[in-house]
Amino acid sequence: MKDAVRAGADSVEHGIDLDDETIAEMVKRGTVWVPTIDHNRYYVDAKDEFGFAPDTIPPLQAYIEKNLESTRRAFKAGVKIGMGSDAVYTMFGQNTRELGWFVKAGMTPAQALATATTIPAALLGHDKDLGAIAPGLLRRHRRRRRRPARRRQRRDQPRPSGS
């Protein structure tokens, strides 16, 4: 991680070996760290599915604790944290559990939510048009007005020929 930060990376994904010097440099440079804590929880939970031997679980659990502690230290020092999952093919849909780890690391729920919205939008240079629900920002989801009764009514009506 230290080398990536020194080289000027805008963000660093994974990695847990953060010394105080690297943390300070990340704060100074505005480097975003994406710790990906939860995917190791997933490996522990899915150990049978993956055929992991029992002796592989304690090191994964220790890694989770070390990752959580590094996230806690980095956040407390002011490092920008981004949400990522490193989701493997059967983990999709569980990736937002990462936000719970961020709350355990000392963030408020609103700060944890920012790791998946405003912080990544700013990282991508889109802090003015993405990452929040506010007037003037791009909308990725359109609100659909539902009128099932009207749709049924139209469907049941005979159509003019040629339509």
Image (spheres, rainbow, N blue to C red):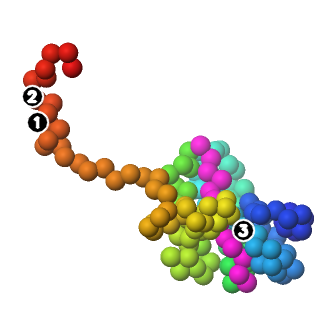
Front residue of 95 and 11: 11
Is there any visible trace of residue 65 in the rendered image?
no
User: Is residue 12 magenta-colored?
Assistant: no
Q: Which residue is mark 2?
A: 157
Mark-to-mark CA distance, 1 and 3? 53 Å
Q: Quadrant of the N terminus?
A: bottom right
Residue 68's quadrant in the figure? bottom right
Front residue of 94 and 137: 137
User: Do the numbered discs 3 and 2 sit on residues whose CB atoms are within 8 Å?
Assistant: no
Q: Quadrant of the C terminus?
A: top left
Q: As shown in the figure, which amino acid type bears the numbered disc 1? A: Gln
Of callouts 1 and 3, which one flags the residue occurring earlier in the amino acid sequence?
Answer: 3
Of callouts 3 and 2, which one flags the residue occurring earlier in the amino acid sequence?
Answer: 3
Which circle, 1 or 3, is nearer the viewer? 1
Judge the density around disc 3: few (<14), some (14-19), many (≥20) Cα neighbours within 10 Å.
Answer: many
Give the residue drawn at x 82%, y 70%.
17
Q: As shown in the figure, which amino acid type bears the numbered disc 2? A: Gln
Q: Which residue is mark 1?
A: 153
Q: As shown in the figure, which amino acid type bears the numbered disc 3? A: Val
Q: Which residues are magenta?
A: 77-89
Judge the density around disc 1: few (<14), some (14-19), many (≥20) Cα neighbours within 10 Å.
Answer: few
Residue 134's quadrant in the figure? bottom left
Which element carries disc 2, helix, strand or loop? loop
Give the residue drawn at x 71%, y 81%.
78
Mark-to-mark CA distance, 2 and 1? 6 Å
From the viewer's perspective, is 2 left or right of 130?
Answer: right
Q: Which residue is mark 3?
A: 32
User: Do the numbered discs 2 and 1 sit on residues whose CB atoms are within 8 Å?
Assistant: yes
